[in-house]
Amino acid sequence: MTLKIDDWGIENQISKHDLVQIFSKIIPENSLLFDPEDLKPYECDGLSAYRQLPLMVLLPETIEQIQQILRICHQYHVAVVTRGAGTSLSGGALPHEKGIILSLAKLNNIIEIDQDHFTARVQPGVRNLAISEAVSAYGLYYAPDPSSQIACSIGGNVAENAGGVHCLKYGLTVHNVLQLTIITMEGELIEIGSEALDSPGYDLLALMHGSEGMLGVIVEVLVKLLVKPKVIKVLMASFDQVTTAGEAVSKIISSGIIPAGLELMDKSAIKAAEDFVHAGYPVDAAAILLCEVDGSLAEVDAQIKQVQRVLQQGGATDIQIAVDEAQRKTFWAGRKAAFPAVGRLSPDYYCMDGTIPRFQLGKILHRIQELSDEYGLAVVNVFHAGDGNLHPLILYDANIPGQLDQTEKMGGEILSTCVELGGTITGEHGVGVEKLDQMCVQFSAAELQQFLDIKKAFDAKNLLNPGKGIPLLHRCAEFGALHVHHGHLPHPELERF
Amino acid sequence: MSLNTNNQDQTEQLLSRVQMAYRERKPLAIQGNGSKLFLIHSLSGQPVSSAFHRGIINYMPSELTVTVRSGTLLSELKKVLAEKGQMLPFEPPAFADNATIGGTIAAGLSGSSRPFSGSVRDFVLGCKVINGRGELMQFGGEVMKNVAGYDLSRLLTGSYGSLGLILEVSLKLLPLAPKVKSLSFTVQSNNFTHKVRELYMAGHPITAACYLDDRSYIRIAGSAEGVNSSFQAMSENLEQQSNPPEEINNSFWTSLDEQQLSFFDHSQPLWRISLPPWTADNFEQYMSRGDRQLIDWGGAQRWFYSNQNADEIRHYAKLQGGHAQLFRANTLSHDELIRIPKQQPLTVQMMKIQQQIKAAMDPHKLFNQGCIYSEL
Ligand SMILES: Cc1cc2nc3c(=O)[nH]c(=O)nc-3n(C[C@H](O)[C@H](O)[C@H](O)COP(=O)(O)OP(=O)(O)OC[C@H]3O[C@@H](n4cnc5c(N)ncnc54)[C@H](O)[C@@H]3O)c2cc1C
């Protein structure tokens, strides 16, 4: 795949050799990688179709080291790409050829758990799931749960404003973080937000979320913790039309219930998942909805009854409530295995991340089917239905000449349709290098220029993760997306949504 | 032009107004109906009001979203939402009948549900705005999840009109709970947070909690079954500690948010002290004679009437991890009013970045110059 990188005009004012000399006085030898051999593992993130070796990789262990590194890069005009766990699906952590990779993998300590105030102060390299595990004994958890949660870092979550299955009810990363400590490109340490629920001045905390490592390096995060729900129940409803399932989603929400999770799978996704994990899914159904509710026992019982009623009236052909925790987990296992299960059906697939207003579900499904017929490429649909966040997977074979290009074109049409239907090109995976072209579809020149001005407010020389997130105005051509070759997923150890 | 004054599109007028100011480099004083002006430093510049830019543009109850013009009255919006069984989850105070939604977003105030449901900015999904170059721009959207571009909609929330003139805002809504109950019981101030947190940890659906004059007030909301069973369980728990609770009217919370309780009949300066969640009361040592406090947000917000020195109050707030906002100046002298910033001063580095943000949005400082800090 050809990757078009915008030229942000970065000219290093130092040789690689001299830079190595300077950095070797700041961090230990084994934390400074510059042999091409050692750089290889850092050449891509979760979007492995794009690869680029950086000048070098630095693995600092302290805030002071990061400050020094950034000051030097600032002085000599060296681009800096911060890297968490490298699970980004949009190429956000892809190296810059004239830049360093600043890996925060060694900053992986939980600094403090504050049981009294329901918060945890953590370093940026701490894995998402590690937070919930560490506070579990206190009856608490950290709510945002991206499916990459066993691997992805909290710093990367903030940078991408990551979501999860439970964000319909409990919010995205931006709703669950109180404070960040960042270092600017000039090496200044700044606290953004506070331990309190709000802070004076402009809300830079919100601005940092989803800024894809372009505004500052996050070196500490204070997260909000929630009390674990007393009771959790999940219900599975079958439908003989995928559009009926889509409409049922709106009906549940219109009835006044906010489920903790609400996910939709179409026939091919059901079949693939069932063949793979035997979750007990109805393979002859056209679609299923998984609906989870949580709260006190009385609350959950009342809500489950109501959801059941709405689904029956909404045309569900069958409804099953998981009888115990084991069955609840099995119901979810099928959903969580949907991506790898699809990987067994086709040599390659391509994952999209558009979001639409829920009531447009029927229309987008219809359009995806039309495109699928037109291009002769099969599509499997897996949705965070409650949020209107789609992950259509286009099946293709990269070994058939031209099919990859066709797939990319078709994906582009899906994302453009999302924008036409009042939605957006990315719900949670970020723009990265992947959706720069679609940014031109979604935003006007004035809006894009405004973004570029905001970036300059933090980083006047445009050295932090240049070429990501925001296209330069003279761009607007082709685009790419997540490519999975022969079922070899980036991070095969992870469950996929 | 539409005869219906509840539905008027003034985009063109407001746009040309800002463009003219941009050409002439003449500052503007942006406001809605002025009900929150007491929260900022006085505005210079030619007045521009969004109050006539009115109307609900798109409301789809099944989507839990609404898009509305900034001049729409908050009261009208709330009424329309309530008719469909929905609400603004952050329960914004109005402080006047003519409060607009634009002013509500620009002031960034949230009511008593804040620690449990979230703040204004948590529910802002998108906005249409005119920047300081007179350009019409749209950020975010009407969908729940959206990470395309920087989140400028949330940045504009709470910026008091100093970054842009908000034309439209899209908000996430929540259904009104089928059942809401409120109760009150006796508690010592230093035990309030502890007690509420204990009930919260036990899984009760608490949506507001405050302390005033040796009493705790708690609201729970959810399905009828859930609320009734929690009400009973909480009552039993309290009775066992020989502290039987008494049910109170839910309207208590509106009176609190709108500052209509008799607690708010004071003439001293009123401070809003924002603190970490569940901060226990340790105020006694800081209070001097005549000071009065109400603890809200389960401990995360204090309303504090005091004649104490602003620096002292701010020092105290900072020690606790929070900050203090001069909310109502009341008896403060004119000199003091000029000298004391309404919001807690920022560090030098933070001010530098905020100035750069201001310059990125409004390079000629046309919008509400100095309304939050003189430097912005
Ligand atoms: C199998 C799989 C499933 C996934 N499921 C989900 C999902 O359900 N929901 C979801 O939202 N995403 C999902 N993702 C995407 C990805 O996991 C998230 O975007 C995650 O937040 C990235 O975190 P990371 O630590 O891997 O960041 P990286 O990939 O290392 O970096 C991502 C971006 O963040 C920046 N960054 C990282 N750390 C910092 C820091 N400390 N300071 C400043 N910038 C930083 C980088 O420069 C880069 O731009 C999935 C990915 C995979 C592979």
Image (cartoon, coloured by chain):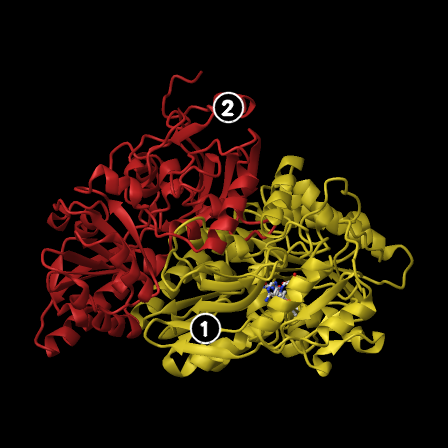
Give coordinates of residue B144: x percent, y percent. Answer: 51, 51
What colour do you see for chain A? yellow
Residue at position x 36%, y 42% in the image: B107
Chain of the residue under label 1: A
Give coordinates of residue A440: x percent, y percent. Answer: 70, 42
Say what secondary structure mark 1 lies in: strand
**Closer to us: mark 1 or mark 2?**
2
Q: How many labels, in total?
A: 2
Q: Identity of the amino acid at label 1?
A: Arg
Other residues around mark 1 within 10 Å, as few (<14) / some (14–19) / many (≥20)? many
Quarter of the image with the N terminus of chain B in it: top left
Chain of the residue under label 2: B
Quarter of the image with the C terminus of chain B in it: top left
The reply to whether callout 1 and callout 2 are in contact (CB within 8 Å) is no
Mark number displayed over residue A153: none
**Splitting the image into 4 quarters, where does residue B54 fall?**
top left
Residue at position x 48%, y 39% in the image: B163
Say what secondary structure mark 2 lies in: helix
Question: For disc 1, does the CB lie below 8 Å from ligand 1?
Answer: no
Label 1: which residue?
Answer: A121
- Looking at the picture, does residue A81 appear above or below residue B175? below
The residue lying toward the viewer, choosing from A396 and A62, is A62
**Is circle 1 on the same chain as circle 2?**
no
The residue lying toward the viewer, choosing from B31 and A30, is A30
Report the Cα–Cα distance between label 1 and label 2: 46 Å
- Looking at the picture, does residue A249 appear above or below residue A64? above
Give coordinates of residue B246: x percent, y percent. Answer: 10, 63
What colour do you see for chain B? red
Mark number displayed over residue B21: 2
Q: Identity of the amino acid at label 2?
A: Ala
Question: For disc 2, does the CB lie below 8 Å from ligand 1?
Answer: no
The residue lying toward the viewer, choosing from A384 and B322, is B322
